[in-house]
Image (spheres, coloured by chain):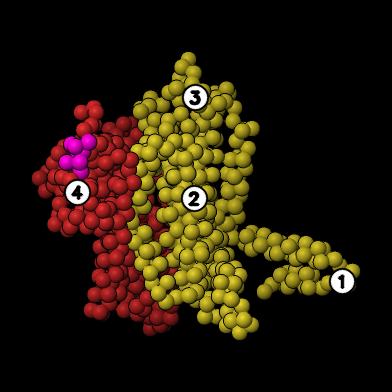
Chain colours: A yellow, B red
């Protein structure tokens, strides 16, 4: 532990008698976040990733302000125009502003992938913790189930689910919800396995034994004692997964299996741009670059986070 | 070892069972049934005709009986008939599988040819310009969507330079020259992304190996650096690389749908994709099941190979 870290700990531990509990807590939070920031700045990859990620998320939040045109309003007089001061990225074959479409499409794809990963975590973590902690028959059965899901080729699962959704004529919000469901279900097995593996190791530790001796219930131990200690590999996995899911959503809508046409969408915009590849190759560049940027942001941040959290790889 | 293999083979049976239930459930989750499709052209439908047809297709039986009848047929290699071409599904699929396997194998081979030297070089010359270039380009490779890369390749090599055909397929055994000609661009698109994964993996497992004691021993015995790296370290570092390449082969079989669509490559992915467009459910069902089983079997082979190469791996 470096001197600086020691100092920041001591600052927390020295409590003057007239401190209120709230002030103590605030100071502790301050110290913890300062530590986290120090750690983050140590890894170049994580720092760059974090900056890229913050930029991406703020652009998504500020989309309504940043967008200059309606993403779905067509104007046939300005079809396939090159970039100009009016249309920063030019216009597509319906005369829609590509800059605004990229922005709105980004907000949508980031939201869906965030929702999908959250859903996968909600499904996977409890299953993994209980399987790893209780072991025995519950573990065996649930892990076989998870194996079955892992063996299921991902893209095909989405194709199946989306075909069913189409036959049921689900549109708009419901279609997105189905996509979140499908991607979440497919995220679940990896999360469950990862959680189970680490939970199994943790459940043999002394502090768990101590908790048993003190008389805490099994559920309480699993959720309050073990879960906080296994959260870091999960965060890394979830971050990398976010980028991966953006790629899948883009691929699906590229195949025409995403939201139907007027909705701005990076994948389907790329597919449309393909038809004008010879005359206007730049149309195909913007959505593609946007996908690359977002995926790279999550990958860099996840990579850096792994280096920080896993001491074994720290010196690499 | 034999016990382990038998154990693993027994383990895949429930996995395939779950897979088949998912696929079967998919068709039954669709609104309407086969009879609706068949009688759709006749306008008003006669309840008696419907009852007769229900009896013919076995739809009057309880759902689990239907499942066992279906799975019994599948086990005998009978997947039913395509609703569109009226040909048996298994013949349609048998024609398609070689193209997909061909593309996936060449793609993986290409990626190993690029990635293993690059990853090794990056590990040996760690923290030099070579290493950073390899790391950055592999990170970029992971973040670039493969369909976008494919489009850009077509744009450059087929449209601008006119060196390679943008789509097409010829079987390898009848016209090898033409076949390879058509294969270059799709295989490049498949191999590029895989190479990015494999480079990262090779680099990190090489670093793992290089930090082990036996490397120091070999060096202190006066062996040349070349011999240490190529004869001892690389060989050990290849174990995870081979395993992951195998797993990637499995995921590629299910994941080439997008690339097959772009390059009009007549593989099983394109078959499933066009079946989705035409609502040809028997083909979707059979295609997904066959691909899923192939993935499960490849995973099994990879696991067993891993055990043979590295006997220290526990039974877990």
The residue furthest left is B174
Q: Chain of mark 4?
A: B
Closer to the observer: label 2 or label 1?
A: 2
Q: Are marks 2 and 3 in contact (CB under 8 Å)?
A: no
Name the image quarter holding the C terminus of chain B: bottom left
- How busy is the neighbourhood of tag 2: few (under 14 within 10 Å), some, or many (20 plus)? many
Q: Residue B284, relative to residue B38: is it above or below?
A: below
Q: How far is mark 4 from mark 2, CA to CA?
A: 38 Å
- Disc 4/disc 3 C-alpha distance (Å): 52 Å
Q: Residue furthest right?
A: A18
Residue A16's disc number: 1
| Magenta-highlighted residues | B47-54
Circle 3 residue: A96
Residue B236, quarter of the rendered image: bottom left
Q: Residue at x 33, y 69 (%)?
A: B239
Indicate yes or no whether the magenta region holds residue B50: yes
Question: On the image, numbered disc 2 is attached to which residue?
Answer: A116
Q: Are marks 4 and 1 on the same chain?
A: no
First in residue order: circle 2 vs circle 3: 3
Camera-near label (4 vs 2) is: 4
Q: Name the residue tied to disc 4.
A: B58
Q: Residues within 10 Å of mark 4 (few under 14, many from 20)?
A: some
A130 vs B38, left or right, is right
User: Tag 2's secondary structure?
Assistant: helix
For marks 4 and 1, give the one nearer the viewer.
4
The quadrant of the image that shows the N terminus of chain B is bottom left
Q: Are marks 4 and 2 in contact (CB under 8 Å)?
A: no
Tag nearer the camera, 4 or 3: 4
């Amino acid at each position: 532990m470096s001197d600086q870290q020691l100092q920041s700990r001591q600052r927390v531990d020295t409590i003057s008698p007239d401190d209120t509990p709230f002030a103590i807590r605030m100071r502790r939070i301050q110290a913890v976040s300062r530590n986290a920031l120090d750690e983050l700045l140590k890894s170049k990859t994580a720092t760059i990733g974090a900056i890229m990620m913050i930029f991406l998320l703020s652009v998504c939040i500020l989309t309504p302000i940043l967008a200059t045109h309606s993403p779905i309003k067509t104007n046939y007089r300005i079809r396939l125009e090159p970039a100009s001061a009016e249309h920063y990225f030019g216009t597509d074959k319906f005369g829609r502003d590509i800059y605004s479409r990229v922005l709105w499409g980004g907000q949508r794809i980031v939201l869906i992938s965030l929702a999908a990963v959250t859903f996968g975590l909600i499904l996977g973590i409890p299953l993994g913790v209980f399987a790893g902690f209780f072991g025995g028959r519950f573990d065996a059965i649930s892990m076989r189930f998870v194996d079955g899901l892992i063996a299921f080729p991902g893209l095909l699962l989405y194709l199946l689910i989306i075909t069913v959704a189409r036959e049921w004529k689900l549109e708009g919000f419901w279609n997105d919800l189905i996509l979140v469901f499908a991607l979440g279900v497919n995220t679940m097995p990896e999360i469950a396995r990862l959680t189970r593996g680490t939970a199994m190791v943790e459940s043999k530790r002394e502090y768990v034994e101590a908790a048993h001796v003190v008389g805490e219930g099994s559920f309480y131990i699993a959720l309050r004692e073990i879960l906080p200690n296994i959260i870091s590999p999960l965060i890394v996995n979830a971050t990398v997964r976010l980028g991966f899911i953006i790629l899948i959503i883009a691929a699906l809508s590229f195949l025409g299996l995403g939201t139907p046409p007027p909705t701005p969408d990076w994948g389907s915009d790329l597919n449309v741009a393909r038809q004008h590849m010879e005359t206007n190759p730049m149309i195909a560049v913007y959505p593609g670059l946007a996908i690359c940027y977002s995926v790279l942001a999550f990958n860099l941040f996840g990579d850096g986070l792994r280096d920080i959290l896993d001491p074994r790889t720290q010196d690499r | 070892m034999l016990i382990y293999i038998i154990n693993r083979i027994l383990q895949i049976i429930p996995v395939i069972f779950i897979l088949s239930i998912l696929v079967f459930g998919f068709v039954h989750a669709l609104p309407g049934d086969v009879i609706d499709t068949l009688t759709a052209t006749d306008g008003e439908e006669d309840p008696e005709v419907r009852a007769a047809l229900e009896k013919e297709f076995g739809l009057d039986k309880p759902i689990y009986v239907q499942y066992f009848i279906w799975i019994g047929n599948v086990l005998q290699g009978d997947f039913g008939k395509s609703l569109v071409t009226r040909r048996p599904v298994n013949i349609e699929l048998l024609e398609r599988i070689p193209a997909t396997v061909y593309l996936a194998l060449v793609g993986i081979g290409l990626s190993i040819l690029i990635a293993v030297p690059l990853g090794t070089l990056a590990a040996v010359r760690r923290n030099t310009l070579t290493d950073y270039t390899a790391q950055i380009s592999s990170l970029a490779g992971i973040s670039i969507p493969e369909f976008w890369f494919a489009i850009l390749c077509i744009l450059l090599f087929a449209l601008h330079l006119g060196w390679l055909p943008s789509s097409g397929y010829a079987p390898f055994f009848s016209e090898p020259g033409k076949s390879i000609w058509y294969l270059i661009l799709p295989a490049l698109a498949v191999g590029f992304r895989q190479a990015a994964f494999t480079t990262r993996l090779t680099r990190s497992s090489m670093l793992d190996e290089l930090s082990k004691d036996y490397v120091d021993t070999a060096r202190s015995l006066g062996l040349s650096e070349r011999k240490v790296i190529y004869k001892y370290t690389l060989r050990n570092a290849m174990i995870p690389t081979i395993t992951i390449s195998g797993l990637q082969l499995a995921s590629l079989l299910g994941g080439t749908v997008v690339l097959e669509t772009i390059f009009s490559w007549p593989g099983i992915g394109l078959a499933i994709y066009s079946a989705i467009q035409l609502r040809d459910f028997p083909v979707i069902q059979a295609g997904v099941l066959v691909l899923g089983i192939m993935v499960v079997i490849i995973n099994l082979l990879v696991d067993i190979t891993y055990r043979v190469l590295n006997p220290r791996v526990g039974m877990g």
